[in-house]
Structures are given as structure tokens and as C-alpha cells.
Image (tube, rainbow, N blue to C red):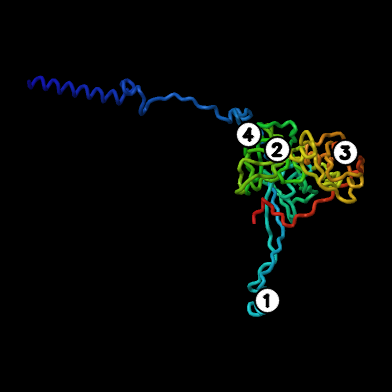
Amino acid sequence: MHKLWLIFAQTVTIVLAALFVVSTLRPELLPWQSRGGGGAVVTIKEAVSDTAHPNVPLPASFSAAAQKAMPSVVNVFTSKEVKISSHPLMEDPMFRRFFGDRFESPQSRRASSLGSGVIVSSEGYILTNHHVIEAADEIEVALADGRKAKARVIGSDPETDLAVVRVDMEALPTMTFGHSDNARVGDIVLAIGNPFGVGQTVTMGIISALGRTHMGINTFENFIQTDAAINPGNSGGALVDVSGNLIGINTAIVSRTGGSLGIGFAITTSVAKQIMEQIIQTGGVTRGWIGVEVQDLTPELAESFKRPNTNGALIAGVLKGGPADRAGVKPGDIIVAVKESPVVDSSVMLNLIAALLPGEAANITVMRNQTEKSIEINVGKRPMPAPQDQYQDPDAID
């Protein structure tokens, strides 16, 4: 029995020694090591470095469009002097006698605001929003490459919220204009600007709707609606397509909090280009005007006027002595065409009239007592809108 136990002990010792040697020198021979673990060689697939093919865009990447458009988008910083009324106690002679001027409130301070702009010409012209530069004493533009320069206002158009400023700089990167009329709902777009002053930012979304009007934002409206994030500071920035071409100027958001809720509006380049060219050539925008107040036809109004549909613009008032009054237009007339162009609603009618040249004679078609009537009007020049003293810049940062 003792001999058997001795043989067993020696056998175990030899086996353990052999395992130790094998695990140390050739661990891959052991069956449990082949299932993975420390020291095992694992085969993996690794992507080729982007630097190997820098000109090949990644799948589903819009970096090429962003890199093309970003250099042409600038940050616009403005400041203006704001008057502050004195505290009523400052007008009290007794108070001033005891305290002098030590507690006198400042009579003015400088308020700053921010926005964005798009370089549209190598001559230094920059397209932005009217409300970004309105009443500004100083305008500074910062390029994506770090350069800065003072800018001067060439002209602006409050009724479309567009403005053109100019800087004296060389080697300016310019934006390529796209065709906003070819844009479709569902197209992917990029919004580029300077939101909240954090620096140039690119956001992505789709075109949610086209031809948005009656938003109460501008007098003349033809907006692209997008869900690309647009925040305060983006005003005047670029809305570009996937090729990096400009199709809109970001101008407004719908928000209850001041931040993006996925409903942003951009002015189409078809409108912006026309306004920009007029401003550069003449310093302002000239529009036709006939002196009427119009409203849309509701189903109830259409029924009362015995109209088969709501197409047309109902004249609610006529300015005495104005072009329409002199031509015989009367309240209650329904404008259905301007120079043979059909009028769908008051917004379309306003745009058609504005496109007429002041001084020319134009025929408008109206429905009066269910009878179609053609009236020739000598078009006048649309007066400038009254300044809004209480206007508050949504991009202001005090």
C-alpha cells in the first residue's frame, strides 16, 4: 500500500512539472488557451485612415458641403448707444444738494448684439438681416480665418429684413448662389452661423415646407421652413444645400423659449439676390404701390360675395387720393389678377404689385358685383415703412 501511494505521488509531481513547463514555454499547446485569454492573438478589421484618401468623402457625410460654405459665412458684431432715463430723485434739488452727483445714473450705455452674414462678392459685399444691423453705430465682421474688419452699411430693406454691408478686405471667400426655386420638401440642408456667440456652427436638417407666408415676420414673405437648428445669433447666416450652395438667408425662428424648436425660416435666394442687387446699385429698394388695404377671402366672405373659391384679395380700404382711388378702385372690389397674373391671396397680390415699376400703367382685374372689370392704374412708389422705435432685436445680448 505504501508503495502504491509513493508511485501516485511521484506521478502527480511529474504531471504538474510538465504542465508548468508547457504553460511557460508553449502555452498555445494547452486546450484551454486556444479559446482566448491573455497572450492570445485576435484578428480584427480596422478602417483605413482618412488621411490615406483625404479627397474621398465619407458615406453620409456633408463635410465637403460644410467646408465649401463655411469660409464665406461671417460673424457680425454690432453695438449702439442706448439712452437711459435718469431716476426721478435725480431731478430733486434737495436730493442733489445732499448727495451731489455721486448717485447719478448713467445717461447712456452701449448695447451689443450679434448675428451672421454671408460674403456674396469678392468686392466685400456681405448679405445679412436688416434687424442685425438696424440702428447700429459700429459694425465689426469676423471671418472664419480669424480676420476682422469694420463694416459700413450699403443699404437695407426692412420689409424683407435684408441688408448689405461692405468691408475693405482682400482675398475674400465668396458664397456660390444655388437655385432656391428648385428646392423640394425633404431636401437636406445645412444652417451655418454664430448661435449665442459660441462661434461658427453647422447644423443639419431638412426642408420642412416651402413658400411660407402670412407668418407676420416681414411685409414680403416667401420663406423656406427648415428643422435645422437655428438659434439667436444665426440671423443673417447661410442655409446651404448638400453641394454647399446658398439657397437661403436664415432670419427667424418660432420659439417660446428663445432656443430652437425645429421651426426656422430662411429667405430664399431668389428673393435675396434681387433685393441685394437693388441695394448695391441704388442703396435701397423701389417697389410699386397702389394705395389699398387688402385681406384674404375666407370661405364665409367668398360665400357672401358668391365666389366659387377663396382666390383673390378683398379690398378693405382705399387710400384717398392714391393711385387706386384715382383709377376708380372701390372697397369691396376683389382683385383677381394683376397684369394677367392670377391673384391667389393678399400675399401674392402684394408681391405682384411690388414688382411693378413706379410710373408705369398696369391693368388689374377686379370682381365687382359679380362682374369682372379691368382697371388701369398708374403705379406709384411704395413709401418707406415707419421706423419701429420699440423694436427689440431678438439677437441682442446686453
Name the mark nearer the viewer: 1 or 4: 1
The picture places residue 86, in percent across and down from the top left corner, at 68, 69
Indicate which disc, 2 or 4, sits on the residue closer to the N terminus: 4
Q: Which residue is mark 1?
A: 92
| Amino acid type, mark 2 | Ile
Mark 4 neighbour density, 10 Å: few (under 14) some (14–19) many (20 or more): some
Foreground residue among 67 and 116: 116
Q: Determine whether label 3 and label 4 are within 8 Å by CB.
A: no
Tell me: residue 283, above or below residue 239.
Answer: below
Helix, strand or loop for disc 1: loop
Q: Nearer the viewer, mark 2 or mark 4?
A: 2
Q: Quadrant of the N terminus?
A: top left
On the question of residue 310 being in view, the answer is: yes
Residue at the image point whose x is 90% and y is 37% from the top: 374
Q: CA distance from mark 3 to mark 2?
A: 29 Å
Q: Residue 308, image x and y in percent?
A: 78, 33
Image quadrant in which you'd find residue 356:
top right
Give the mark, 3 or 2, whose residue is nearer the N terminus: 2
What amino acid is at disc 1? Asp
CA distance for labels 1 and 4: 64 Å
Q: Which residue is under mark 3?
A: 364
Regarding mark 2 in the picture, which secondary structure is present there? Answer: strand
Identified at 89% across, 47% down, the residue is 325
Left or right: residue 292 versus residue 242 is: right
CA separation, marks 1 and 3? 63 Å
Q: Which residue is mark 2?
A: 224
Q: Residue at x 61, y 44 (%)?
A: 260
The earlier-in-sequence mark between 2 and 1 is: 1
- Mark 3 or mark 4: whose residue is earlier in sequence: 4
Q: Is residue 373 left or right of residue 187?
A: right
* Mark 4, residue position: 63
